[in-house]
Image: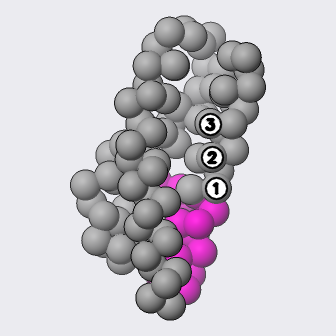
Amino acid sequence: MRKAIYKEFQETIEIVADLSAMVIKDSNRVVEDDYSNLEKLAKVLDCEDMLEDLKAANGLRNVLVHQYNGVIDRQAYDSINSLLPSIKGFTATIERWIKKG
């Protein structure tokens, strides 16, 4: 169950990163690394309120994938739960952007 949760979170954040790059590209801006793209995305879509959480989610994804210094399961679980509202907000923001397109 633990590995399944980590894998789902990893894939979710990879989707966030891919969508961010697509929005940046479609906005005629230069696509860069995930963190730079998230900063640009926050300005393009006026969603600065979720920027720090999306960056934290990307960092947590890296920890889960590469297992830097091991993973403390309770901490990872709590972090995932605390980041979910911003990920859901990102989804709603992207849906609005697509409908405008």
**Magenta span covers which residues?**
17-36
- Judge left or right: residue 62 versus residue 90: right
Which is more N-terminal, label 1 or label 3? 3
In percent of width and height, residue 51 lies at: 34, 53
Q: Residue at x 44, y 63 (%)?
A: 92
Label 3, label 2: how far apart the Cα atoms are: 5 Å
Amino acid found under the numbered disc labelled 3: Phe
Q: Residue at x 52, y 81 (%)?
A: 98
Residue at figure coordinates x 41%, y 36% from the top left? 83
Label 1: how many residues lie within 10 Å, few (<14), some (14-19) or many (20+)? few
User: What sort of colour scheme is used for the picture?
Assistant: one colour
Tell me, yes or no, whether the two marked residues, 1 and 2, touch with CB atoms within 8 Å: yes
Helix, strand or loop status at disc 1? helix
Is 18 or 67 nearer to us in this picture? 18
In front: 96, or 31? 96
> Circle 1 sits on which residue?
15
Majority secondary structure of magenta residues: helix
Q: In the picture, residue 22 is in which quadrant?
A: bottom right
State yes or no: residue 67 in magenta. no
Q: In the image, is 47 to the left or to the right of 38? A: left
Which residue occupies the extreme left position in the image?
49
Q: How far apart, in angstroms, are the residues tagged by discs 1 and 2? A: 5 Å
Residue designated by label 3: 9
Residue 4: quarter of image: top right
Which residue in the protein does label 2 denote? 12
